[in-house]
Image (tube, coloured by chain):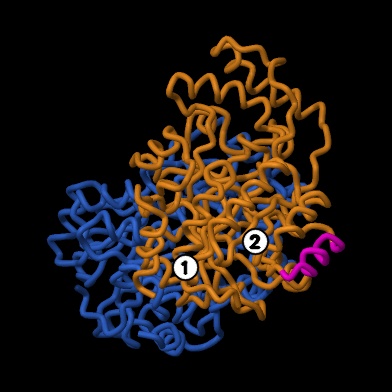
Chain colours: A orange, B blue
Amino acid sequence: MLNLELPIIQAPMAGVQGSELCIAVSNAGGLGSLPCAMLSLEAMREELEAITAGTDKAYNVNFFCHQPPRVDAQREAAWRNALAPYYEEFGLDINDSAPVEDRAPFGPETLEIIQAFKPPVVSFHFGLPADDLLQAVRAIGSKILCSATTLAEANWLADKGVDAIIAQGLEAGGHRGMFLSEDVTTQVGSLALWPQIVNAVDMPVIAAGGIADADGVAAALGLGAAAVQIGTAFLLCNEATTSQLHRSALRDPTAVHTALTNRFSGRPARGIVNRIIRELGPLGDDVVPFPLASIALGPLRNAAEARGRTDFTSLWSGQNASGCREIAAAEQLRRLAAKL
Amino acid sequence: MLNLELPIIQAPMAGVQGSELCIAVSNAGGLGSLPCAMLSLEAMREELEAITAGTDKAYNVNFFCHQPPRVDAQREAAWRNALAPYYEEFGLDINDSAPVEDRAPFGPETLEIIQAFKPPVVSFHFGLPADDLLQAVRAIGSKILCSATTLAEANWLADKGVDAIIAQGLEAGGHRGMFLSEDVTTQVGSLALWPQIVNAVDMPVIAAGGIADADGVAAALGLGAAAVQIGTAFLLCNEATTSQLHRSALRDPTAVHTALTNRFSGRPARGIVNRIIRELGPLGDDVVPFPLASIALGPLRNAAEARGRTDFTSLWSGQNASGCREIAAAEQLRRLAAKL
């Protein structure tokens, strides 16, 4: 469908990569991705200019499709209350955390930008944008992908007419793409999710979640996937912008213990277990809705990181970080494709 | 190692199968299993007599290795309190639930029985028995298998000198074999768990969790497993003793939604989401320790089942029930082995 040399998509990972990784993967024969969830419109435009200058191969532009959060005074109070002891510990004032909105959903202004660049592939997370926006993306000619975390979500996306479904197994790092339910018990491991979605829908399925090496790629294709999407294995690549603290955490044997947590953003996402997950618990209602949770965490994260600590840092990782290598993305892609 | 015709172990499933399924699978070239967790010593002896009369092939005898529970008055009160409205709804008296101990761990008396029968394979769940008991099992000549749900458990078992490790991915139905941690966030999806354990230990790894068909079997072997262990796909087989209510639940499309729950026994186990899971939540501290939770549930389960309802029934299932077929176990085994 995408005429890729290799059926491997580099998963869009907001905050830890930009155009450089995307270009490297696309030029090496995979599908590089640009995560736009945390980019301003201006930054998005600059990154897309870099990509179109850097490769003439297909690339993917990824957006979040969450509903903007409603202000909830009770949860805001609960969240501040949960964080208050940490603010005290680090000598910070909770009123210093300014309410900046860092993750905007796909909307008319982002549509305008992609109308200008006409990316070969556009992928969505947390469901799809409103029908008129989706039609406008389709009119550009971009292939449309979207994550499904359950059979119900896959069927819903198939009805909406996407071009391919990304089946995101529970092993995956970062944010769960779940959008029809907030119940994390609905989330399914890759090995059970992929074949059930392949059997249910009549379109290409892209397998994601837990793939760390060439054997994992081969297993996914053997289970009926048309392609794979891999994130964690690219986190240590030279072209990723992963922080040194995050890189150290990924190299450590304790990276084997990750958890789904809503502590960093308000939505369930998988990261390496660290202090805030351990002390507050991975999931709870005492957190503000996505994406607002990161606001009050920001000053704590900065203060801790300044001391070399990851107490409040989102250390996104899937359940198998064993494939991470400190090499060029093109070389990592070749390793992943070694059994194709 | 076991000289099996087919590298497929039928997972021991206490409460839904006995010698008949075990014999059918072993005679068809797989490794049939007898779950002993819920059998009296007398029943265990009878079942082993049936198996040795019914097959001359290898078979597996499975035991739980939990610590006997401590009485905890506070949790007992919390559990009774949680169930009280249901007792009222069904017109029952909570004092009618007699404290019968239904799941005994492996101990000297069970050792005596297996010393008499010398089963080719003995497998353990929830860790291993005490060293002297383990040595005694080894002295019989039985190959020893044990479930690991994390890399740490696999390394622990390798140090103990088991003959093979069953890597139980998060997708698996029934009780999690976890024994080094009670933290369910440590639990890993099959696709991420299997290869990490294969890489870590120098012994055969048996892949379990989410395998529903021949493609799943092939994927597991491709990821380095020496064999697979499959449970759910045998639950509808003619030789299983799965109840009609449980069978109906497995055939229903809602079987796609399972959860890890400690509501039925006190330990996390995966089953199809039903009323008690929905209303009390899948996991909580307001339940008595394993295996005592089932005692107070018993009268409720019986009363509801008499009305054709599964409100309080443990509907064990993995995350992929799509492979269940109402056929003979030998035929199911052939289907699962179709791509070997």
Give percent across and percent down for residue B176: 45, 54
Q: Quadrant location of residue B14?
A: bottom left
The answer to which of marks 1 and 2 sits earlier in the sequence is 1
Which label number is shown at residue A147?
2
Give percent across and percent down for residue B331: 45, 90
Give percent across and percent down for residue A62: 65, 55
**Foreground residue, A195 or A54?**
A54
Q: Chain of mark 1?
A: A
Distance in Å between CA atoms under marks 1 and 2:
22 Å
Kind of residue at disc 2: Ser
Q: Measured along the vertical axis of the image, is residue A41 above or below residue B122?
A: above
Give percent across and percent down for residue A292: 72, 34
Kind of residue at disc 1: Gly
Q: Residue furthest right?
A: A132
Q: Residue at x 66, y 77 (%)?
A: A201
Instruction: Find the magenta span and give its range.
Output: A131-141
**Foreground residue, B333 or A155?**
A155
User: On the rendered image, what quadrant is the N terminus of chain B found in?
Assistant: bottom left
Q: Measured along the vertical axis of the image, is residue B254 above or below residue A175?
A: below
Q: Chain of mark 2?
A: A
Report helix, strand or loop for mark 1.
loop
Q: Residue at x 53, y 55 (%)?
A: A22
What residue would you read off at disc 1? A29
User: On the rendered image, what quadrant is the C terminus of chain B found in?
Assistant: bottom left
How dense is the environment of label 1, judged by Cα within 10 Å: few (below 14), some, or many (20 and up)?
Answer: many
Q: Measured along the vertical axis of the image, is residue B153 above or below residue B30?
A: above
